[in-house]
Image (cartoon, rainbow, N blue to C red):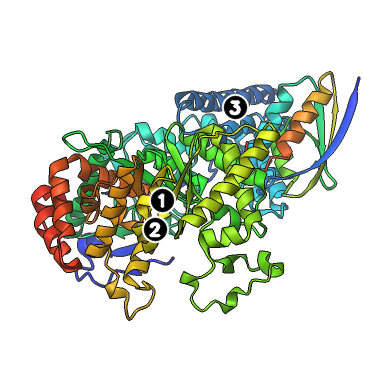
Amino acid sequence: MTPDMDEKNENLHQAGREQLTLYGISGSPGIVVGKIVVLSHQQDQSACYRLDADQVESEVERFQAAVTRAEGELVDLRRRFEDDFADTLSIIDSHILMVRDRMILKRTTRLIRDKQINAEWALSRALGLIKEKFERIADGYIRDRFADVKYVAGRIAGQLSGHRPESLAGTAEEVILVSDDFSPEDTIRMQSEKVLGFLTEKGGVTSHTAIVARSLGVPAVVGLEKVTSICKTGDTVILDGFSGRVYLAPTRDQQLQYLEYDRQHRAFSDELAWYIHLSSETVDGLRVRLSANIEMPAELQAVQQYGAEGIGLFRSEFDYFHQDHVPDEDTLFASYRDLLAGIAPDPVTIRTLDVGGDKFAAYLQDSGVRLDLERNPALGLRSIRFSLRESALLVTQLRAMLRASCYGRLRILLPLISSLSELQRVRSILHAIMEDLHREAIPFNPGVEVGIMIEVPSAVVMADTLAAEVDFFSIGTNDLIQYSLAIDRGNEYVAHMYEPLHPAVLRMISQTVEAAHNQGIEVSLCGEMAGDVVTAPVLLGLGLDELSMRPSAIPHVKRLLRHSYFRQLTDLGEKALKCGDGGEVRNLLTGYLPRYYPEEFGNR
Amino acid sequence: MKVVTRQCRVRNPKGIHCRVATRLAEIIADHEATVQITGDDDSVDCTSILDILSLALIHGSLVRFRAHGRDADKVLAAVEALLSRTNDP
């Protein structure tokens, strides 16, 4: 990542500094403009001198006192931040242990005594010996821990010379700090000082600086090669923590432009953050559940962060494909149990395997299926059809789900159901598994909710019949659009005809909702349409009970919902159903959206 | 005094790095026992985390422990549990 000239800019020598754009890695989001202070981790410049024999013991005492103070400082720091920053604390813990480690303590003391040299000198020699030892380590990760040892020794040296090396005392204005790297202690302590942002040469997204900067909410760009030599204290920079770019010596216009970007980002995310803890309902009290689509349990944090009310779609494929063998029941059980327990009491909707059989080529070797011969895979052996053919896979997955059903609210979702008989087959398999579990005295919830995806036109037409047999519907618009409009979205010649707002699609959604509500069951919708603020109002107007989307879209849709009236949404839905084609629906929305949501759509 | 030995493999993908070494030293400090740890050829006692780190015990390394003291059994059980974890303590 070498610095590049920003060629677009004509004013190259403003304020006597060359304009440069430096490309690094985004460590923590946010944009700031400010002056920088370059902190060079100072070399050990302290004097080295020999001692008289009678000075030795007092020198040892001086050293030990410095160690005690350095330790005390670390312990204090740890106490101040006990409640936050779990990641940081464990790093501080190892630093606390190191400061009293005999490789530093005993060796330095011995060097002072044996060689009759001053403490600073002895400490730096002890550090040199440790360095030699670490340099012989082949493993890069462990070898790099020498940086921590050096940092700890630096703190002791700082105490010996009586000053805090990284203190910013004296800076009156808020500054952007530039360094080779920051220790977590540096980063945390700077919270109380005036720091706008961080720039470092070292590090990636998971570096100490990045982790701590994110938890402090301070923008940071890391991995900027040579930044400490390119930038000088007093230079003005724009730090863009979103893109990982740093603009050195920006023009006045650039600064104003980026400050405006920052203001927009903040205004938007502050306002959206406000919605995360509010209930998802219209002004007049109609509640709609906004839930999350996820693929991995690791996404749970995002689910909670964005205020999702449960998981509307857990795509269960990840467990099958992140390793080279098919997972066993216990692995799946553990995965589902953690998910359910993590979200309880909100529901978790787990969809059974929804893939083409081609993904299971190895598994299918002996089953006589030749998937490479499928001429039309979208209409072929996939999803529930595949699961029913390879029923051992399905049984394992359903058993794992049932066993997990005691740990929260589970909803089992069956994809690509196109006829009642498929549903009945799965039902009878479920029934048999329940009897087995009962016999084996393994606990499960016998009343677990079972639902189907409505994504094949035949299921829409038969929705009234199907609704009598299940506990909920989930409309999968991505496939429903492809099957009802006969459009392969991946085909460049027809992709432009893929129209989510086609009245045919909207009418199918509406029929499904009506059939479900007549039977008293809920309908969710989990395609991309659910998380799109343009299409979401229409969907809400069609009477869906739940929209499930990627977690980060939830605050946007919730804001929309909370600015709506039930009557106004149903009006929109009714009008959209009467439109002749997708273009007409879009025209309707062009009139509607800016009128009701001027903040989002007013400028379009 | 009771002497107990045990050997196990390092399961943490990053090897025995700071966090693991710190926890190891803490476990030993919490028990009444002294523990020697032996990597490929070096042997150190577990009170120095820098000594432990410098053994460079990477993922898959075979490690031998030798403990003596009242809690020798208990401490090695805890140590073995720590080393067989695949995530950070």
Residue A411 percent location from the top left of the image:
47, 42
Q: Residue at x 69, y 48 (%)?
A: A134
Residue that mark 2 sits on: A459
Return the mark for residue A67.
3
Q: Residue at x 66, y 25 (%)?
A: A60
**Depth check: A468 or A525 in front?**
A468
C-alpha distance separating marks 2 and 1: 8 Å
Left or right of residue A582: residue A209: right
**Depth check: B75 or A429 in front?**
A429
The answer to whether tags 2 and 3 share a subunit is yes
Q: Nearer the viewer, mark 2 or mark 3?
A: 2
Residue A165 in view of the camera: no
Q: Which chain contains the residue that carries disc 1?
A: A
Give, as a three-letter code, the residue at label 3: Val
Give, as a three-letter code, the residue at label 2: Ala
Q: Quadrant of residue A5?
A: bottom left
Mark 2 vs 1, N-terminal side: 2
Secondary structure beneath label 3? helix
Are the two marked residues, 2 and 1, in contact with CB atoms closer than 8 angstroms?
Answer: yes
In this rendering, is residue A127 above or below A242? above
Q: Which chain contains the residue that carries disc 2?
A: A
C-alpha distance separating marks 1 and 3: 74 Å
Q: Residue at x 44, y 65 (%)?
A: A1
For label 3, the crowd category at 10 Å Cα-Cα, with few meaning under 14, some 14 to 19 and many 20 or more, is: many
Q: Residue at x 33, y 65 (%)?
A: A481
Mark 1 vs 3, N-terminal side: 3
Mark 2 vs 3, N-terminal side: 3
